[in-house]
Structure formats: C-alpha cells, structure tokens
C-alpha cells in the first residue's frame, strides 16, 4: 500500500518574508470527491497534471495514490467534475537534508501559509526552520479539501 506520512505547520509570516525563496509553482487543484474517509483530487501545474486518491488520516499517516495524467485531461476534470477548488503557490525548500513544501494560498484562502514535510515514519526526528510556527497536523480545517469548502477568509466572518 502506498502511504504518505506528512506533518503540517503554520508559518511565521514575518520570518517567511525574509526567506530567500526559489521560484514558486502555481497549483490549481480541485476535488472530485471529499468525505471523512477519502478524497479524490485533480491537480494542474504549468507542466503536469495529477490524479490523487487519499484515504483516512490516522495521526500523520494515510494511504495515498498519485498518478500523472495529461494536462488537458486534468483541466477537463477540473472544469467539468470538480465539486470544489483552490489555488496556491508552492515553494520547495531544502533544510537540514529534508524537503519542505510551503504553500501560499490564493483567492478565498489568501493570507494562509502552510508548510508540509513528508517523513519516512511518524517518529522520525527533524529540525524545523525558524519560519515554522505552530503544528496543525490532524487539524481538519487545514486540510486542502476542507479549505475549498470553508476557506480561510470565512474563519473571521
């Protein structure tokens, strides 16, 4: 079984602004299915399309199956079948021999910045960069699929 072990963190905005970042990549992603047990996501970047199926999270671990698909197919799925959608810019940053993916959300989620790190086990030790703030692993309101339904801007209304 393919699994993903991932921890999520909020970012200190002031410290993040000081980071020398690589060029970010814009993501458009939508959900064909989202419920408590599973999600089916379509994602498009400038160069690729992906179909991803994720199962129920237990701690920081969940089943994940991801397949590259042609960009025209991904766009057609997004435009015709997605029930919800979001956009973000992703930055990939190496720190202490680990890869951090930092998402700056756009649209109704603007202002939210989340960092993710994939691990080989839930007990794996790693160092956090100083721009990493509060851990939100397991907090469902930060799941991308939930951000399409209850976006960040609605949290303050």
Image (cartoon, rainbow, N blue to C red):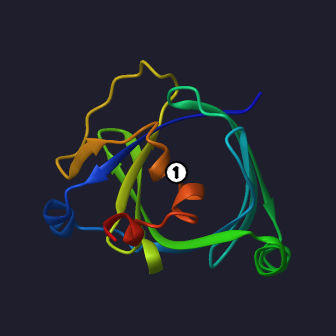
At x 45% / y 52%, what residue is drawn? 142
- Give the left or right position of residue 118, taking residue 45 as reference: left
Residue 38 % position (x, y): 73, 43
Give the quarter of the image for residue 105: bottom left
Q: Is residue 65 above or below residue 108?
A: above
Residue 129 % position (x, y): 22, 45
- Give the left or right position of residue 40, taking residue 4 as reference: right
- Give the left or right position of residue 150, taking residue 94 as reference: right
- Residue 123 seen in the figure: yes
Residue 1 % position (x, y): 77, 27
Q: Is residue 67 above or below residue 38?
A: below
Q: Which residue is mark 1?
A: 143
119 and 30: which is toward the camera? 30
Residue 63 % position (x, y): 70, 33
- Give the left or right position of residue 141, taking residue 52 as reference: left
Q: Residues within 10 Å of mark 1 (few under 14, many from 20)?
A: few
Give the quarter of the image for residue 27: bottom right
Q: Is residue 149 above or below residue 77?
A: above
At x 48% / y 32%, what residue is drawn? 119
Q: Secondary structure at mark 1?
A: loop
Q: Is residue 41 above or below residue 108?
A: above
- Residue 106 seen in the figure: no
Instruction: Look at the image and tell me in which quarter the C terminus lies.
Output: bottom left
141 and 8: which is toward the camera? 141
> Residue placed farthest to the top in the image?
123
At x 15% / y 67%, what residue is drawn? 18
């Amino acid at each position: 079984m393919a699994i993903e072990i991932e921890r999520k963190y909020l970012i200190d905005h002031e410290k993040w602004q000081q980071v020398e970042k690589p060029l970010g990549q814009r993501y458009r992603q939508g959900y064909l299915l989202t419920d408590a047990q599973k999600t089916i996501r379509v994602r498009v970047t400038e160069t690729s399309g992906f179909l991803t199926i994720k199962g129920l999270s237990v701690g920081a671990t969940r089943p994940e199956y991801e397949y590259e698909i042609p960009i025209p197919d991904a766009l057609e799925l997004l435009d015709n079948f997605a029930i919800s959608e979001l956009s973000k810019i992703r930055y990939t940053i190496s720190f202490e021999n680990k890869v951090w993916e930092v998402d700056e959300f756009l649209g109704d989620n603007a202002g939210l910045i989340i960092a993710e790190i994939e691990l080989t086990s839930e007990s794996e030790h790693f160092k956090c960069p100083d721009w990493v703030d509060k851990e939100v692993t397991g907090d469902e309101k930060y799941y991308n699929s939930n951000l399409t339904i209850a976006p960040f801007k609605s949290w303050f209304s």
